[in-house]
Image (tube, coloured by chain):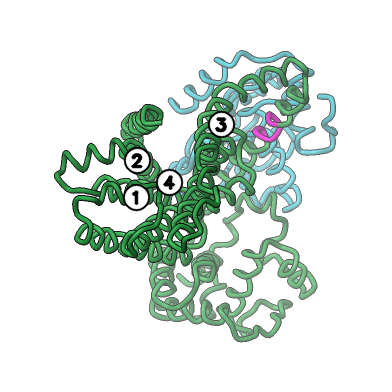
Chain colours: A green, B cyan
Amino acid sequence: MRVFLLCAGALLLFSSLRLRAKARTAPSALYVASLACGGLGLMVWAPENSLAVDKLLYTPGVGHLLTIWLISLCFILQFAFITLLTARCPRLHLWAYTIHATLLALFTLAWIAVHISLDGSFGTMAYGAYAGGPWPVVVMDCTGSLSIVVPGLLGAWGYLRFLLEGHRLDECLGAAGALSVLTGAAVYGVLILVNTITNSLGAHGIGLFALRIPIILISATLAPLTMWLVIHLQPLWRHLSSAWGHGGGENLLQREEELFQLRLDLLDAQAVLDDAVARLQHFADGPVVEDVASRSARCDLFPYGQRAAIEAAIWATAMRDRPSWTPWTAASAGLLPDEIGDPEQLSKLAYQAHRFTADTLRVVLLVLGRRHLPEGIQARPEPPGWRRRAAAIVLMALRDHGYTRAMLLRPHSEQAR
Amino acid sequence: MQGIPLLTPQGLARSMCDDLDLAPPFSARLFADAVERRYDLRIAMEPWPSGEYTTGWCNARDSAYTIYYYAGGSVVQRERIQFHELCHILMGHLSGRQPPVVMRGESGSDDREKTVEQVAQALVAYSMLGDSPAERRTRESVPLSAYGQFIDSLLDR
């Protein structure tokens, strides 16, 4: 057992050293730190090694303290890693870390109490298979096992959620390996807890603690097995799938079609962006648009409303040059706002067009005001809400830059005259 | 051109290219060269001198055409403007017999502009990306290196 734990610990430590160069992101750093803690914890876990650490540091029981701390940190770091990866429940994180810190603090206090009360016999009592004993030892064993069980279960929950979300096969296999280790450790912690309590109550020999060996063996086997499957089974499966022609060709064609469509969409997006930039640079009034952007950011307008306000400012100030402005969107989006001559078409655009276009149009109509709308256009009454606030921001910016509502629809050339 | 209905922008774009014996990848300049050869015309393409924003302008004088385009945007936008004006020439909206200066929005109805713009959009997609994978299976494939050279030539211009 000692050799097995030493080898497993050394392997984990080696893995963390190998991965440390890649630990540039927070999840990677957490994962590497977890592996390092786990590796060191496994190496100190064997009672002979714990006693060796005790002798080395001239402190009885410090090996046990280190084991619980390192294994517990390994598990909570795994929990932090997997929940950060899936961005789940920040509120739960706070609770989890608080409970974990409390348990570790209680364990450490109990350990100090045991250290003071037992001193030299610490090693015999602490490494005595959780056979109960004086109450400081019982408290230390209970809090120590809970320090393993709680982060172990939290980590297992995180990995289970990850698995249920349905990721790639190799990621799922890796998660299954971690899940097996964390669950096995949590069950092992529960066994310690039960054994400690039953022994301290005098109910010796219920035999549950004997289960620890198969549990350790099962979880210790599952982790490398899943890694082996990740490394070897997936390429084998791919090879067999392509050999048997299990939809591989069809999937490839489907992927090709999707990629082609994506490239077409990117070309269109590029054209729309070019037009928007040119429109802003050559027709819209840049200072007004910038003013609206800064005002809407200062007000309590949410990001979508800010975008609509900025777009409305561009529309409002670009309208003056409409005759020479034929944007690309004319080909794909159909009617332009000021091409609409009757309320039915306006209503159709407002309710069938892209939501953003419709919202921007409603803000622009508010900016123009009913009295200044071109003949034939009748705006519906706008209920109080963010569009009114956006329109007010645009109007304020326009007025501060010397615009009146009547000027917005008048071409530059007429204004010059 | 199996699978693409002729009376769609994509169908029109493809029939133009087939008529000019052009296979992707090609630029608007190569397209113009092919139009010159096929119809015995001269087509010059120049940036709009003042730098002002216009989506395109074509000056027609006898069999010589000058296309002015907005050069302040990206390669995609420039190609699209040039294809748009080339479509006007190919679709017979401009000819040397018309008044010498014709500008978008003045040469015809908005519907015609929209149709031309949709064909230009299809031409840009076809010239840069070629056939869709489904179509490509029925046509002879172009070496991948040709696309690299094409992109380099566009960026160098």
Mark 2 or 1, nearer chain start:
2
| Label 1 packing within 10 angstroms: few (<14), some (14-19), many (20+) | many
Residue B87: x and y in percent read 69, 35
Q: CA distance from mark 4 to mark 2?
A: 79 Å
| Contact check, label 4 and label 3, Cβ < 8 Å | no
Same chain, labels 3 and 2: yes
Same chain, labels 2 and 1: yes
Q: Please, what is the three-letter code of the amino acid marked with disc 4?
A: Ser
Q: Which mark is residue A226?
A: 3
Seen as rendered, the residue at the extreme left is A58
Instruction: Identify the residue at image location x=23%, y=50%.
Output: A121
Residue pointed to by mark 4: B50
| Contact check, label 3 and label 2, Cβ < 8 Å | no
Q: Nearer the viewer, mark 1 or mark 4?
A: 1
Residue A269 on the magenta segment = no
Q: Please, what is the three-letter code of the amino acid marked with disc 1?
A: Ile
Instruction: Identify the residue at image location x=16%, y=39%.
Output: A56
Mark 3 or 2, nearer chain start:
2
Q: Which mark is residue A45?
A: 2
Q: Nearer the viewer, mark 4 or mark 3?
A: 3
Task: Give above or below for B125 relative to A339.
Answer: above
Residue pointed to by mark 1: A68
State which chain disc 3 sits on. A
- Quadrant occupied by the N terminus of chain A: top left
Task: Give above or below for B148 relative to A328.
Answer: above
| Label 2 packing within 10 angstroms: few (<14), some (14-19), many (20+) | many
Q: Is residue A239 visible?
A: yes
Residue A363 lies in what quarter of the image? bottom right
Please report the bounds of the magenta region as a residue range.
Answer: A255-260
